[in-house]
Image (tube, grey):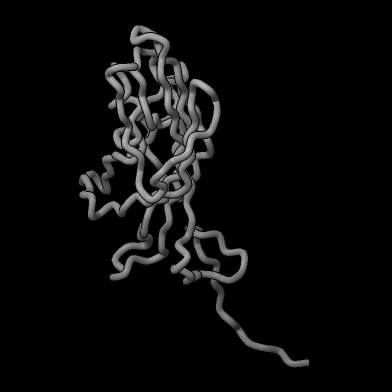
Amino acid sequence: MLIETPGFFGQCERTRSLNFLVDTGVTECGLQPDKVAGICINVLSAQEQGVNFAASYNGETLSDSDFKNFVVGEQIKYSLNTNLQVNITDNKNFQTTRFDTTTCGCDNILLEAHYTVYYEEFSPDETTSFNITNVTVDIVYGSYTPKSCNETLKLSRKTSWSFKRSLYSRKTSGGPGYIKGSKIITGNLQGVEKD
C-alpha cells in the first residue's frame, strides 16, 4: 500500500510503501498550491485521499473484502477562515467533501488523517501469521471560503500510521517482555538440582 509522505522538496506524494508493524510517526507534506475549484473534490477530498487505497500482497491486488473496513475514529473540523472549531453533525460517518460553485468554498477538506491498524496474531483459519481486523481513522477536516474564486490556496497535510494488537487477540508467543514479531528464545530443561 502506498502512503502519503513528503517528497524531496516537501510536496505530498504516494511513492512509499507502508511496512507492516512499523509506525510512521506524524509526517507533514505540502499540497501543490492551486485554486480551490481545481483541487477541492479530488486533492482535498477525504474520500479520495484519506480512505481510498490500493493494497497488494505478493504482487496481487487485494479486493475491498481482503483489506478490512476503515472505521471512523475521532473527527474534528475547523474553519480555515476563522481558525475556530466547527461542529460536525454526523460523527459516525466520514464527511463528504463539497465544493460550493457560488462562493468557490470547499467544505470537509482533509487536513490530517491518523490511522491505527488493529491486527490479530493469527488469522481465523491460521493460514497467516497476522490478520488485519480493522483500520481506525482519526480525521481533522477544514472548511474554507476564498475571498475570490481566483485566490490560490496553500495547504499542508499531516498523516500518521500506528499498529496495535486487536483487543480480541491476546495470544502471546512468549512471556512478559516479548516483542511482537520477534523470534522466540526457547531452551530445553536439562534437569533440576535439589539442595
* Quarter of the image where the N terminus is located: top left
| x and y, in percent, of residue 14 in the image | 35, 29
| x and y, in percent, of residue 4 in the image | 39, 32
Establish if 79 lies above or below 26: above
| Residue 160 seen in the figure | no
Q: Residue at x 55, y 29 (%)?
A: 84
Q: Residue furthest bottom?
A: 194
Q: Quadrant of residue 106?
A: top left
* Quarter of the image where the C terminus is located: bottom right
For the image, the number of numbered tags is 0
| 116 sits to left or right of 132 | right
Q: Residue furthest right?
A: 195
| 114 sits to left or right of 49 | right
| x and y, in percent, of residue 179 in the image | 55, 59
Q: Nearer the viewer, residue 58 or 115?
A: 115
Establish if 7 lies above or below 127: above
Q: Residue at x 40, y 24 (%)?
A: 12
Q: Residue at x 50, y 44 (%)?
A: 23
Establish if 131 lies above or below 8: below
| Residue 109 seen in the figure | yes
Q: Nearer the viewer, residue 4 or 182?
A: 4
Q: Quadrant of residue 185?
A: bottom right
Q: Residue furthest top?
A: 150
Q: Residue at x 47, y 23 (%)?
A: 156
| x and y, in percent, of residue 40 in the image | 32, 23
